[in-house]
Amino acid sequence: MRRIGWLLAALLLTAGTASSPAFGVSQSDLDEVDRQKAEMAAELEDASDEVRAAGAVLAETEARLPGAEHEVDVAQGRVAAAEAESAQAAREAEAAREALAAAEAEYEAAAAAVDEAREARASLFNATARGAELLTVDAILSSDDPAEAIDGLTYLEFLMDGKDQAVQEVTLSRREAANAENAAATAQAAAEAAEAAAAQALADAQAREAEAHAAQLAVQQLQADQEAALAVAESSRDEAQADYDDLEAESERLADQLRREDDDDSGDHGGGSSSGGGGGGRGWVVPVDGWKSSDFGWRMHPIFGYARLHGGTDFAASSGTTIHAAASGKVVYAGWSSGYGKLTCISHGGGVTSCYAHQSSIWVSYGEHVDKDEGIGAVGTTGDSTGPHLHFEVRVNGERVNPVPYLPSCLCR
């Protein structure tokens, strides 16, 4: 069984670290985990080490699971958004590539038009040049025939107009080719940017997918931790029941002893009658400077589900804190008592007794008279205790009753 306890400690460490999602964990989440673990520990103070370890794992996993499952939902939503963004980026990249292909085709056509214009006008340029050399203005003007001179000038003008038109056509083709080249360069840049965006979107989608996978694994690990803890707890069910039965038997033995003490010494020890009533009227004090961490009463076992009585009120306090007598009386028990650990009980007369359990040290002796508020011991964690605190009981004719009505309503010192 001791080895199982070590294994559960390892499980608890896993549940507190590796099982947690690496994102989305706030301080309030961690505080809630600690709170639930503390509550589980308080409810299992009389359980075996193995059951308490299993309870710690269960409390931690139950506290973490809702957040872990939420992280799965969030991560899956991120995956869907990233995949949609990646698909849109891929479509934009495809459109950019198509635009680039069209721009490159337009540029190639424009460049071919330049070459065609250049070749088509080359002969005209040569002819014009030769014609202009032969048909000079002086030759035309020196002609004796006026009609021939006019025809020559007209032809010369035609040659010049043709040359100008050819130059304009080539220039226009070149301009169109330059424009097409610029458009192709712009389309090339757009296509490269779109492809880069698509690649980044794909990488983001893959990262989100990895996050979702990690979140799902965290949930699965928490669930596995739960199952392992439950298996260990279930294997200790009979032992836990036997431990509880032993504690109840010890409580009954203590009750019998307190009843015998009360029969032997029926005098009033200064604590008041055994009737109920509020604390202020009885004049009792809160036995320790701490805060109420667990109430008196019946409650369900957090793992096994059976009802059991928590026979006192717990006050959390640091180890070594002074424990005070709630009222004056005679010490009728001072020593070790099984699950109670180091225990002191004080008879206040009229069948009313107060008991102080889990002490680290006892400062009074059997038969000694103590005054109200006198220091009688120190807080500890002896017996079946999961941490330093005072387990405070009030018994009437040996039977446990709710201690709170005997104490000041503020539960403060």
Image (cartoon, rainbow, N blue to C red):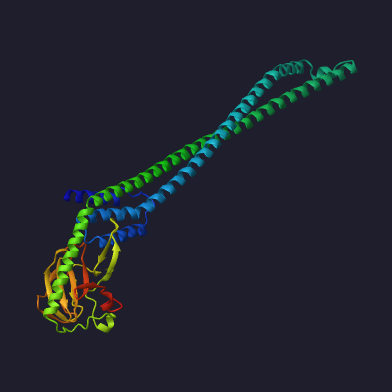
Residue at the spot 29% in from the left edge and 53% down from the top edge: 58
**Would residue 212 be found to the left or right of residue 316 on screen?**
right
Query: In this picture, is 331 found above or below 207?
Result: below
Task: Report x, y in % for residue 2.
Answer: 16, 51
Query: In this picture, is 71 found above or below 152?
Result: below
Q: Nearer the viewer, residue 109 or 68?
A: 68
**Would residue 157 be found to the left or right of residue 98 on screen?**
right
Query: In this picture, is 397 found above or below 14?
Result: below
Task: Report x, y in % for residue 189.
Answer: 54, 35
Residue at the spot 35% in from the left edge and 46% down from the top edge: 218
Quarter of the view holding residue 140: top right
Is residue 376 something one can see in this rendering?
no
Q: Quadrant of the C terminus?
A: bottom left
Residue at the spot 22% in from the left edge and 52% down from the top edge: 236
**Would residue 6 be found to the left or right of residue 178 on screen?**
left
Query: In this picture, is 172 found above or below 362?
Result: above
Q: Nearer the viewer, residue 341 or 351?
A: 351
